[in-house]
Amino acid sequence: MTLRNDGALVSGGVVVRRLPPQSDGRFADKDYFDLLDWIRRQHGDDVALLDAYARLIRADNIGVLGLAMKTAPTLRASLERVERYWRVVTDTAVYRLDGSGDPAFLTFEARTGHHPVLDFRNEGALAGFARNMRLFVAGELVLDHVTFRHTCRGVPERYAELFGCPVHFSADRNAIALKPAMLDLPNRLGDQAVSDFLTAHLETEIGSLRDDPSVRAALLRRLTPALSQGVPQAADIAHEIGMSERTLYRRLAEEGLTFRDVLTEAQSSLAQELLRDSTSSIAEIAFLAGFSEQSTFSRAFKRWVGQAPAQFRQQVASR
């Protein structure tokens, strides 16, 4: 299939689906996810489709970032570039590298509201990454295990075969786990000078993204992962974004929002995601969403969605 600039999806010369026209070369996240869900339903076998995607996708498909990954000297350096520059590919998710423990984790975190296809999207992201790491790393790359926050929708053994390692569902993160020594494996095309040149280009690209007028999006990217440490102060978040607290309030007002509006959106979205896709207790979810008391969280959640957290989880499970 070919996706034209006017949003027409063409297969065999026939338009099989239409998306709203692209804006600045990007699709709205919902339009993209709707398309992905349609493709998944047309195919009918999720694991086979994931395998086909992982075999087809290459680091080169993501432009300069892919080349910077391949030419970085080690796998660790490759993943550090992915962590910093993934925003040049999409603003719907980020990668986080935690190499401080054993095992090390490459975690994939969504940055959008819930959509039915996100579980499949997360599986595809990690499947493609696992296969590509094995392609550009010199030597044998061994994955310790892979985890997903959602429940398994198919046969677990097929997922283990796809990833070449144990796969655990209903976990606390979407991640690839590997021994720390794996991060120090050299890359086949490692070239520090070339990688530095490409990284400088990526710095220019990501610098232009910081000019995105949507302060709401910038706030959500920082608020969601910070909530487990308590509700951040507006002044601290403003400093991270590179503006004064007064400017932050003014920019939000221009978008018809307040800091409290965006904070509530981040807390509500995260809480709903955790209630849907994790086995965490309601008390744990309250803490992760920035609340010190479960009762306060429960009252706020009911105000947001019209249901108590337990009712919401039960209704999702029944579906």
Image (tube, grey):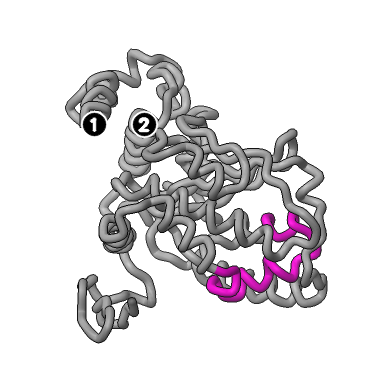
Mark 1 = which residue?
Answer: 304
At x 28%, y 79%, the residue is: 11
Taking 29 as reference, is 144 above or below it?
above
Q: Looking at the image, can residue 107 be seen?
A: yes
Give coordinates of residue 220: x percent, y percent. Answer: 42, 47
- The residue stretch that appears in magenta: 58-80
At x 67%, y 56%, the residue is: 79
Give coordinates of residue 114: x percent, y percent. Answer: 32, 44
Q: Amino acid at mark 1?
A: Trp
Res 16 quadrant in image: bottom left
The disc label shown at residue 241, or none: none
The disc label shown at residue 271, or none: 2
Q: Amino acid at mark 2?
A: Ala
Give coordinates of residue 179: x percent, y percent. Answer: 75, 40
Mark 1 element type = helix
At x 74%, y 38%, the residue is: 100
Q: Looking at the image, can residue 235 be seen?
A: no
Left or right, residue 11 beside residue 87:
left
At x 39%, y 45%, the residue is: 119
Give coordinates of residue 159: x percent, y percent. Answer: 50, 44
Q: How many neighbours does mark 2 have within 10 angstroms: few (below 14), some (14-19), or many (20 or more)?
A: many
